[in-house]
Image (cartoon, rainbow, N blue to C red):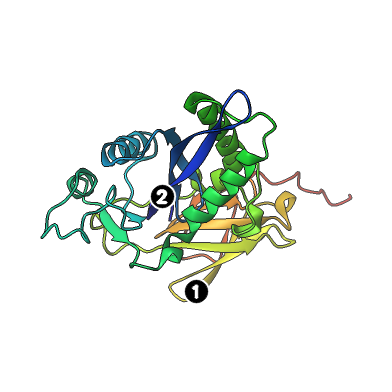
Amino acid sequence: MPNQTWQSDFTHYRLTRPDGRPGTSVEIISWLDDCTRYALHVSAHPRITTPIVVTTFRTTIARQGIPASTLTDNGMVYTVRLAGGKGGRNNFEAELRRHHIVQKNSRPSHPTTCGKVERFQQTMKKWLRAQPSQPHTIAELQTLIDSFCDEYNHRRPHRSLPHRATPAALYNTMPKATPGPPSHPDTHDRIRHDTVDKEGSVTLRHNSRLHHIGIGRIHAGTCVILLVHDLQIRVVNAATGELLRELTLDPNRDYQPTGAPKGPTRQSPK
């Protein structure tokens, strides 16, 4: 689910002097939603420190909500668990503890654990280097980063997402995970991918019984995602994120009608 895990990492980028020579090396921190690849926050700084990690994290949760967990490498800006701290925590670890967020760290020498955010950074840096006008300052670099994130989140189809949807299409329509134990432990949450059939419906099994959910023949052939929370169901267009239908399943009937008015009844000839 979105917000179930946020990955974070930082990378280096070298500014360019006005005469074209290589300039100062700066660092870029990224916060990426693990489920949808949505770039939650990306910013450039002279150097990434623990206070910057905390500040960018707080900025991100103020805008996107609190995640259930984080996943990072073992850099000391994220954790001091390998630094002989004997149970001590840095400010970021203390911040996670205050919000009851599970902290996950990659095993030493296993960088692929955080592969999604690292791949995102590779894509971003390749795009940045391809720009005809290279940034001279951090402010100019941040402007380019913001342009890249807007394109990446909202317009660039993502090959690893269902139906090549954009990260924003999924992140903004799917239910979000939250930290701590669930308030309703007996609820059943699931996500199902389907295609609207020629009759304009999709199927969903509940308590071993198959139900048909009317969407409308106008949507026949559309790839959809069903977001199911017990009997509460939302059906969204998998490519655009458009909400096609929201309903409460009636477990006592097979077909769940759309509720749209029927066409005029044909009169038999006299």
Residue 259 visible, this orientation = no
Residue 244 picture location, percent across and down: 60, 47
**Left or right position of 182 against 219:** left
Report the quarter where the N terminus lies: bottom left
User: Residue under circle 1?
Assistant: 209
Give the structural element (helix, strand or loop) at label 2: strand
Q: Amino acid at mark 2?
A: Asp
- Depth check: give the residue in front, 158 or 18: 18
Mark seen at residue 11: none
Q: Nearer the viewer, residue 155 or 122?
A: 122
Q: Is residue 16 left or right of residue 88?
A: right
In depth, the one of 128 and 204 nearer the eye is 128
Pinpoint residue 99: horizontal percent, then vertical percent: 22, 46
Q: Amino acid at mark 1?
A: Arg
Give the Cα separation between the discs numbered 2 and 1: 45 Å
Tag shown at residue 9: 2
Sequence order check: which comes first, mark 2 or mark 1?
A: 2
Relative to residue 231, is residue 40 depicted above or below?
Answer: above
Q: Residue at x 39, y 39 (%)?
A: 64
Residue 106 x %, y %? 35, 64
